[in-house]
Amino acid sequence: MNLLLDVNIIVDVCAERPLFGKASRDAVNLALARGFGVWIYAGSVQTLEYTLIGELKRICADDELCLTNRQISFRARALLKDFCADKNWLAALSAEGHVFEAQDPEDEQLIRALDRLTPGEIALLTRDEQLLNRQDPRILSPEQYLTRRPEARPIDFIDLKGQQNDIRPALETGIHRVLHHGQYIMGPEVKELEAKLGAYVGAKHAISCASGTDALLMALMAYGVGPGDAIFTTPFTFIATAEVISLLGATPVFVDIDPKTFNIDPAKLEQAIIALKSNDPSIRPLPLNSVLSTQSSALIPKGVIPVDLFGLPADYDAINKIAKEHGLFVIEDAAQSFGAVYKGKRAGALADIACTSFFPAKPLGCYGDGGMCFTDDDELAAALDSIRVHGKGSHKYDNARIGINGRLDTLQAAILMAKFDIFPEEVQLRQEVANRYTALLDGASVRPPHIPPDDLSVWAQYSVLAKDETHRAALLKSLQEAKIPAAIYYPKPLHLQTAFAVLGYAPGAFSVSEDAANRIFSLPMHPYLQKEDQMKIAEIMKRAC
Amino acid sequence: MQIEAIYDHGRLELPGQIRFAHQRFTVRIDVPDDIIVTHEVSQSEGHARTSYTLPPEVAALSQAMADRLERIRNAPLPPDEQLPPLTQKQYNRIEAFAFRDEFRKMRD
């Protein structure tokens, strides 16, 4: 359980108060050693400093030491600086200000702070008898905490809390700044974020939007995609990629994946383009409306949307070459790959337009929905800028085209800026976690991910292949019994989804995707995953083989 | 090491030839049962006396913190005149918190 420290506990430890210092210190270290957060209420800083000064003065008097107020103050600050260095600061909120009717305003502030935290996850650690006598299960003495039954820290599939604690000061400052300037729509943080992320990716233009799905929709709209158009994409992905094609009345033409990378197979893409152009499903499976079309209603191949699945970029050299030969545009679905590298270039700069997502679970995620388009093309950038604001022309009430309400909230931009500050470091940590998994799973009966030599995955997921569906079920059961979360991305390929039944694809049409859907599953993956947790996961996987 | 000391009206008198590295530390003393008249343990002390066992790695972590803070407590201090002056506001706070502590003691 995480701990919120009352002032008396910190003074116990810093002054090593006889009788109390050791237990308070042990309780704090027990929480830290088990990986729990230890919090200090930011509103207590002054109380903390002057209470410790008072305690140090008492000690000096007892020891007949002659120190000046300045020297005692100097020592108190040095002790607090050291003690607080690895603790989290809990912000004092305005709701904790009006406490003057309480018997003890300081205690009341702490109780109110507890009220906004998740019950069962954090306790107030104190020696204050008045607080302890409230018989509130959220309030513990050091001894009560030390004699509790040991609790195991849960392994998270994605640890957003650990990350949040690391960036909390920047995060809270950013959010408060927006609350105070009040420009909730297209505020200054939005432009700043676009400039930063565009520079990071290496794209001339970055156009933020409300979600990764909107980014894809806007990109297709910028190309004027509509009924009669065919867009080639993978069936082994989240529905958003193909959904936006159908939303615009166009037709998704699925192309099977490479069995090693799970990304669209360039060789099969070329065959699918030829199959569509010649309306010959014997070359590659085609959607029903293409097969049944007459010459006048034949689908027109317009573009390709490769997906950088699990954070690994697709093979863009091959895809862009094929697309160019057939006069197609390429939209990079980089929803999972922001931060990845393909042959020296960052994901987000690998096609005509790239679209990423800031869904919370993504490598760079906000606290809601968000997305961004990247392009080097001035005209496309202008179109995207217009489409995201209802097709605006020269001003808000001059509408040059049909668009959408697709703007990124300023609050989400502020959150992303705080997260982006540590993003490069997190990408590095993700590599280390992935490398550890691959080494630890050596000898297990699952196939680890394959990363081509010139590429760098950003490891949105660490997905492995079981031998078959039964084997996967057994492994997942073992993980579940050990309370280790796992997920299947994706259990059913898009061509077999009811939503796309109208396309008429039969089971077996994309055998590699179907096989992957039956065998794949993803393990916990985030930059803060501990080696001990990974060892436990690998051990379970090997034992369950 | 174990040494003999004399209890005299609330103070412990230790042999004069021993010098200690620190001015303040915890000691354990054996008190003969036959001289104890009453033994009242406050609730706070009661909490402090609860026994618990720490895993060795946690105990080591806790000891490391104790050592670190002790080094800070015993580090030589700069001469008073080399330290930034305390403002009147800071002196006021020191007084205010001393009053607060007195107030709390009266309340308790």
Image (cartoon, rainbow, N blue to C red):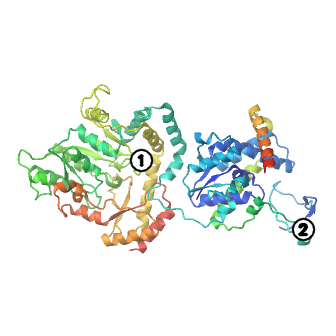
Q: Which mark is residue B36?
A: 2
Q: Position of residue A474 (x, y in %)?
A: 37, 72
Judge whether residue A198 can be spotted in this image: yes
Badge 2 marks a residue whose secondary structure is loop
Q: Position of residue A487 (x, y in %)?
A: 38, 61
Residue A530 vs A208, above or below: the answer is below
Q: Residue at x 70, y 45 (%)?
A: A104
**Is B74 left, or right, of A273 in this rendering?**
right
User: What amino acid is found at the position of numbered circle 2 in the picture?
Assistant: Ile
Q: Which mark is residue A365?
A: 1
Q: Image quarter for residue B42? A: bottom right
Q: Residue at x 52, y 37 (%)?
A: A176
Q: Nearer the viewer, mark 2 or mark 1?
A: 2
- C-alpha separation, residue under disc 2 versus residue under disc 1: 66 Å
Badge 1 marks a residue whose secondary structure is loop
Q: Residue at x 58, y 61 (%)?
A: A34
Numbered marks: total:
2
Say which of A11 and A351 sits in front.
A11
User: What amino acid is found at the position of numbered circle 1 in the picture?
Assistant: Gly
Q: Give the quarter of the figure containing the N terminus of chain A.
A: bottom right
Residue B67 vs B103, above or below: the answer is below
Q: Position of residue A32 (x, y in %)?
A: 60, 57
**Is A39 left, or right, of B100 in this rendering?**
left
